[in-house]
Amino acid sequence: MEMGAGSSSRARPKRKKGIKKTEVISYEQSVVQLSKEGRKTYMIVEKKRKRPMNTIHGAYSAVFDNTYPQYNWLYNGWLVEERRIMLSGRLYRYYYDPKGKEYKFRYQVEQVLTSIGKHLAIKKPVVIVLDD
């Protein structure tokens, strides 16, 4: 079938050079790529969970921390578990703080990070002692 004038099909936008489609990363690869702080959080989360990550039938998972470009907005030690349901293709994200607490929504994480940032931004008085 030829595409002639007046055809209703749309041309695909050209992808910029250097930008690749998001690659699927295995669970094992994602764990290996975690930072030192990310691995500590991962171990805490695994100990707290009833079922280890990536053991849910019909789903696969990967974990990321702030070293992964998509999640560079996270603080050190925070994790994101991406869980994809194979049948539907639905993607669920679960966020974990360095103590292993789970958050289901990004806005919750952003609220916590904002309050942490405000707490860290409070300046404490500095005393300087000069000896003669």
Image (tube, helix red, strand yellow):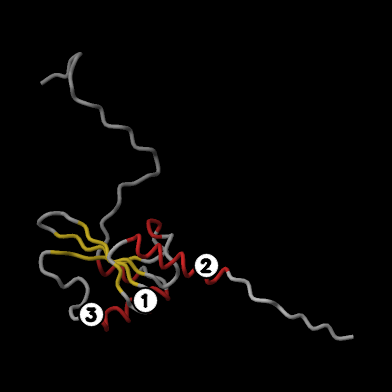
User: Around disc 3, counting alpha carbons within 10 Å, would you say few (fewer than 14), some (14 to 19), or many (20 or more)?
Assistant: few
Q: Spatial distance from mark 3 to mark 1, Cα to Cα?
A: 15 Å
Q: Quadrant of the N terminus?
A: top left
Label 1, on which residue?
39
Determine which of the numbered discs, if any, sits on residue 118 in the image: 2
Q: Residue at x 54, y 71 (%)?
A: 120
Q: Spatial distance from mark 2 to mark 3, Cα to Cα?
A: 31 Å
Is 92 positioned to the left or the right of 57 in the image?
A: right
Q: Spatial distance from mark 2 to mark 1, Cα to Cα?
A: 26 Å
In percent of width and height, residue 15 lies at 34, 37
Q: Nearer the viewer, residue 25 or 86?
A: 86
Which tag is nearer the camera, tag 3 or tag 1? 3
Mark 3 or mark 1: which comes first in sequence?
1
In percent of width and height, residue 87 lies at 9, 57
Label 1 near label 3: C-beta < 8 Å?
no
Secondary structure beneath label 1: helix
Determine which of the numbered discs, if any, sits on residue 14 in the image: none
Label 3, on which residue?
49
In percent of width and height, residue 42 lies at 32, 76
In percent of width and height, residue 8 lies at 18, 22
Mark 2 or mark 1: which comes first in sequence?
1
Is 69 positioned to the left or the right of 7 in the image?
A: right
Secondary structure beneath label 2: helix
In the rendered image of this protein, does residue 4 appear above or below residue 39? above
Q: Type of residue at label 3?
A: Arg
